[in-house]
Image (tube, rainbow, N blue to C red):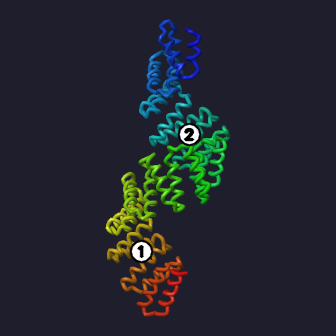
Amino acid sequence: MRSGDAIRCASGKPQPAIVACTNIVNDKHESDEARAIALRNRAYQFQQAGDPDHAIADYTAALDRPEPSATLAKIRLNRGALYIQKGEEPAALEDLGKALALDPKLKSAYVTRASILAKRGDDPEALDDLNHAVLLDPNDAAAYIARGSLYSHRGDQSQAIADFSRAIAIDPNNAIAWRDRGFAHRESGENSAAEADAAEAIRLNPDLASAHFDLGLSLAAPGRTAQAALEFDKAIALNPLDPHAFKARGDLNLAQGDADRAIADFTSAIALDAKLVSAYVNRGTAYMNKSEWDLAITDFSTAIGLEPRLYAPYVNRGQAFGAKHERERAIADFAQAIRIKPNAPWPYVQRAYFRQLAGDNQGAIEDYSRAIELDPKNSEALRGRGYVRLTRHEADGAIADLTAAIALNPKDTLAYRFRSAAYAERKDTQKASLDDATALKLAHP
């Protein structure tokens, strides 16, 4: 064996290492052991060079050679990781399972297999694998981070925080652990702790785009919009392929009333992820703010096509149809929203309004009444039912509803006007005049 090939094959940059390893593999004068080692090393170098197909071919050839169980287990582990990279999860699971059968103490195989199982929704099996990994090495921060991420995904934020905290205790400089604990804190409603953790992750790794994104979310929650916008800008600059960062910045622009910039950000998010439902919903809302009803309807319809059981797109599309005076289509959308979320008062209020416009006063009263039952402090529902009762010449019922609406919202000009008309129907001119004066004062302060 030429000593130079042996050194280059065992270490160094991938391309010269691959050439050196190939020389050894093809040299019939080399020992079987030397050629087997070179084959495994070449597979690893192909893997490092981003050439999964050649790496898999070499690992497969290596499996045909007689090797100790521990060596075969590591070959299976490496080939399984390559199958994951290629999106061939069944093949990866088979390799990882065989790796663990060969070496039940191969911790990284448990962690790697858990990542596939979690992605497939097999959370109990994934958790079992991660528990094994932690037991095998209680001082491995990566295993705690992986298990914490699984707990967080399952909604068990307290367990997630405990695992991330353990990872931080083991490796205080691990920016990922700080970032992920911040996420779990935010999901638990602990926004200050989330902000502190994200800031520490950024201190440890200023180029960690996801930490800037998380910090932006934590800053946006209490209304620190200018600082949040800066963090979203940084996240996008560091990772311009993250649709969620664009969507978050779009949400911020939408909340600040800048519909055009919001639309631009939502459009960027959709270009990166055509199935990001929330971006379509929020872009549709931005279009509604610009009275661009058809564009809004298109976005809400796309969201419904992607996620038919989502409540918000039906409510929003119903409002857009209503703005276009397409009452039947509006009513149909509000009806579907009610079927999806029967205990939400808002679609009842909306449907009631359009039912009343269509002349279905009884249906309108039923919807307003249901909304009030669900939310007794819903002043719009009380005002709406009061108005319908007024049109039915039920003055006493109208006055009762409108008085309740005014108690909840003393600046409701329409409620005063409608109650004035109800008082006038009862020929109580003094109270009618007083309500008219109040309505005029509110309209022209």
Q: Residue at x 38, y 69 (%)?
A: 351
Specify the quadrant that holds the N terminus: top right
Q: Residue at x 56, y 45 (%)?
A: 237
Local crowd at mark 2 within 10 Å, few (<14), some, or many (≥20)? many
Residue 32 visible in the displayed image: yes
What is the three-letter code of the residue carrying label 2? Ala
Residue 190 visible in the displayed image: no
- Residue extending farthest top: 29
Specify the quadrant that holds the C terminus: bottom right
Residue under circle 2?
A: 146
Image quadrant assignment for residue 202: top right
Residue under circle 1?
A: 369
Q: Residue at x 45, y 78 (%)?
A: 383
- Residue extending farthest front: 260
Local crowd at mark 1 within 10 Å, few (<14), some, or many (≥20)? many
Residue 62 position, x and y percent, is: 47, 18
Residue 88 position, x and y percent, is: 42, 33
What is the three-letter code of the residue carrying label 1? Ser
| Viewer-closest of 139 and 359 | 359
Label 2, label 1: how far apart the Cα atoms are: 50 Å
Figure label count: 2
SS of the residue under disc 1: helix
| Viewer-closest of 440 and 302 | 440
Q: Residue at x 45, y 73 (%)?
A: 372
SS of the residue under disc 2: helix
Image quadrant assignment for residue 228: bottom right
